[in-house]
Amino acid sequence: MRKLLALLFGLILAGSVLAKEAPPAVPDPALEKRTMALAEELRCLVCQNQTIADSHAELAIDLKNQIREKLKAGMSEEQIRQYMVARYGDFVLYNPPVKATTVPLWFGPFALLVAALAGLFYYLRRRRSAAPQPLSEAEQARVQALLDSPEERR
């Protein structure tokens, strides 16, 4: 058994002698850097609140490949952004510009917060004004009569 383990260990060590440094994943690191910088500015259309660079969805991978191909073809980053906006709308931008069509994206959460606070204020105010009223003398006498009746003692 020891000889078998020693043999396996020797083979593993012999294999590591032939190991080489891994080649770069992309042939042009500068192009990949530009691709990833632009992918950081674009939102994944499938994922929730993730950039294309962070996402592993098939659509995000396809969009990264499109960006890479367009950069290779000589398009500028701004031209690629405009292409993506024309194709997918302003929502594809991770920080969309403030304009009439993106107002709900920018101010919708604040409007919902204000509406929720107004609703809470209204509810608390109504609850405070609806405090229980004291019983009238007739109601108190009836309660006392019910408490004093022999049927209630059982």
Image: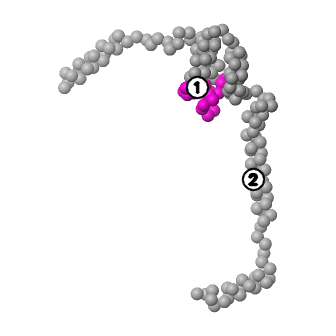
Looking at the picture, does residue 22 appear above or below residue 87? above
Work out which quarter of the rendered image holds the N terminus and state it: top left
Q: Magenta segment range?
A: 41-58
The type of residue carrying mark 1 is Leu
Q: Quadrant of residue 39?
A: top right
Whether 53 is among the magenta residues is yes
The label number, if any, that marks residue 88 in the structure image: none
Q: State which mark lies toward you, 2 or 1.
A: 1
Work out which quarter of the rendered image holds the C terminus and state it: bottom right
For marks 2 and 1 on the same chain, the one whose residue lies earlier in the sequence:
1
The label number, if any, that marks residue 59 in the structure image: 1
- Rendering colour mode: one colour
> Which residue is labeled 2 in the image?
120
Callout 1: helix, strand or loop? Answer: helix
Q: State the image coordinates of residue 7 (x, y, percent, origin top left).
A: 23, 19
- Lateral position of residue 136 relative to residue 64, left or right: right
The type of residue carrying mark 2 is Leu
Q: Quadrant of residue 42?
A: top right
Query: Residue, x 74% and y 44% (percent of image)?
Result: 113
Closer-to-camera residue (149/46): 46
